Image (cartoon, helix red, strand yellow):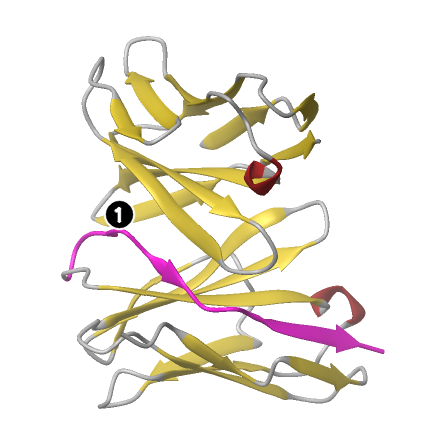
Amino acid sequence: EDKVVQSPLSLVVHEGDTVTLNCSYEVTNFRSLLWYKQEKKAPTFLFMLTSSGIEKKSGRLSSILDKKELFSILNITATQTGDSAVYLCAVIYNAGNNRKLIWGLGTSLAVNP
Amino acid sequence: EAGVTQSPTHLIKTRGQQATLRCSPISGHTSVYWYQQALGLGLQFLLWYDEGEERNRGNFPPRFSGRQFPNYSSELNVNALELEDSALYLCASSWAGRSSYNEQFFGPGTRLTVL
């Protein structure tokens, strides 16, 4: 069964800490992996990864994909309280003639001052 | 640039009733996606519309249906509401072509409560 598993489910850190969030997947015909940040309601796009080993970076956030080991990590350095959110991972893959997207349950990050 | 908008913000219905949720995509986007986010279940894909046609459907019963209008706005209908339909319903839009998912921009969601 195709699935996306995120870990940890929940994380509490202090401001200034560095965190690493994991997203592993089991799908056939992988196309790309997406990271989103969901604070209250609407998830906001962070990164799209399609190639192994190429780091995507935006400020204090970075992400990398390992297509051999079937996972991606999202790093946040020098965390701030505004980073508190649920971080969602989604994988796009081919299923027959269709392209599908499957989401993980998310990692809930709380950054305490 | 205006973002994705959804209405209503909250909707309270009773079992057996029908609910209609609306979504307006970002100007220029032709694809609209609907998701259900129930507590503890994460985002569950419901429907994808592009250029007025249904492109893909998640594992939901036929009670969940929708459509996309010529102006690319979309409507999600849920018939014969059940208690477990209570969830946040998110709409997203993108420039996606006919065979792919692209970066999706999400609306604020509609919180549906079924009593």
Quadrant, the C terminus of chain A:
top right
Q: Please tell me which residue is depicted at 62% across the width and 80% down the height of the picture.
A: B9
A61 to A40, vertically: above or below: above
Answer with left or right where residue A77 lies relative to residue B112.
left
Residue at 36% over, 41% down: A46
Q: Residue furthest right?
A: B115
- Give coordinates of residue B45: x percent, y percent: 47, 56
Instruction: Say which quarter of the image contains residue B30.
Output: bottom left
**Mark 1 chain:** A
Q: Residue at image x 25%, y 50%?
A: A98
Q: Is residue A33 left or right of residue B5?
A: left
Q: Main secondary structure of the magenta part?
A: loop
Residue B104 in the image, given as x and y percentages of width and height: 32, 56
Q: Amino acid at mark 1?
A: Arg
Quadrant in which residue A56 is drawn: top left
Q: Residue furthest top?
A: A69
Q: Is residue A8 or residue B45 the one in the foreground? A: A8
Residue shown at 38%/73% (left/top)? B4
Task: Please give the range of residues in magenta.
Answer: B98-115
Where B12 falls versus B89 (above or below)?
below
Q: Secondary structure at mark 1?
A: strand
**Looking at the picture, how far across and down is residue B68, in whole percent?**
32, 83
Residue B74 percent across, percent down from the top left: 38, 82
Residue B99 falls inside the magenta stretch: yes
Q: State whether residue B49 appears in this view.
A: yes
Relative to B96, residue A73 above or below: above
Report the residue marked by disc 1.
A99
Given residues B99 and B2, the one toward you in this image is B2
Crowdedness near tag 1: few (<14), some (14–19) or many (≥20) residues, C-alpha within 10 Å? some
Answer whether residue A105 is visible to the viewer in this image: no
Q: Is residue B45 magenta?
A: no
